[in-house]
Amino acid sequence: MIKATDVKDLRDKTGAGMMDAKKALEESGGDLEKAIEWLRKKGQQVAAKKQSERTAHEGMIESYIHGNSRVGVLLELNCETDFVARNEEFKALAHDIAMHIAAMSPEYISAEDIPADVIEKEKEIEAEKLKTEGKPEEMIEKILEGKVKKFAGEVCLLDQVFVKDDKTTVEDVVNNATQKLGEKIVIRRFVRYSLEGDPIMCSIKE
């Protein structure tokens, strides 16, 4: 039997509704950590559906200047309605993403935005390394898949580990906000300025 106190604890930790929290505990045999994971997976599924089915043309432009004034970011974060665009949680999300961009210097928004020639060049470099290490030919292609995925995790904003929580990615953060705010949220484009180099300008493929 699921205790009311357990439902309350789960709601306090996740912000889930009462029925969702109860269902999660039932599906997880009363295990709080498993229930949190169940809710997280459900949230990702709901967020993915919202992201694919809806359009986001409202939102805001967020600016972030690093403390030493040597790095600056302009970010366009979109949502579906002006109501959510004015929400403090949405504004906080935009601020956190802009801060992450300043700290982590992503070169693309998602893996889909990486040009094919960049991927091929990366595979060529890694393949040469593997050959030098004496890896058998039949293993190289399989290893390269992991290398390309790792590369995307380093240069793509959505695939990067979130700077404020090393247990989640930027994509997870956006999906969680989508679930919580009830609207599609899209990182449309950004530019990162630095005194150390040329600006990085990114936008999603429409």
Image: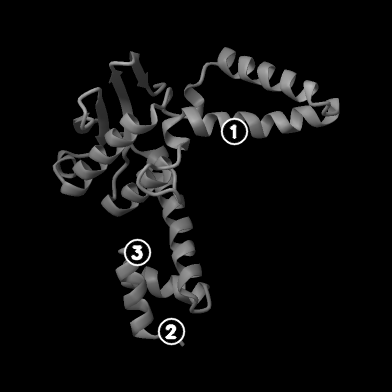
Which residue is label 3 attached to? Answer: 14
**99 or 175, which is in the foreground?**
99
Judge the density around disc 1: few (<14), some (14-19), many (≥20) Cα neighbours within 10 Å. Answer: few
Q: Amino acid at mark 1?
A: Lys
Q: CA distance from mark 3 to mark 2?
A: 17 Å
Which residue is pictured at 40% across the width and 48% down the height? 47
Q: Earlier in the sequence, mark 3 or mark 1?
A: 3
Residue 40, horizontal then vertical, whole percent: 44, 58
**45 or 109, which is in the foreground?**
109
Is 15 positioned to the left or the right of 24 in the image? Answer: left
Q: Amino acid at mark 2?
A: Ile
Q: Of the residues tagged 3 and 2, which is closer to the observer?
A: 3
Q: How many marks?
A: 3
Residue 149, which numbered label?
Answer: 1
Residue 70, horizontal then vertical, whole percent: 24, 22
Is 66 positioned to the left or the right of 7 in the image? Answer: left
Identify the secondary structure beneath mark 2. loop
Which residue is pictured at 42% across the width and 38% down the height? 52
Q: In the rendered image, which quarter is residue 51 located in?
A: top left
Q: Of the residues tagged 1 and 2, which is closer to the observer?
A: 1
1 and 2 marks in contact (CB < 8 Å):
no
Which residue is pictured at 31% across the width and 30% down the height? 102
Q: CA distance from mark 1 to mark 2?
A: 41 Å
Which residue is pictured at 31% across the width and 39% down the height? 185
Judge the density around disc 3: few (<14), some (14-19), many (≥20) Cα neighbours within 10 Å. Answer: some
Residue 20, horizontal then vertical, whole percent: 38, 68
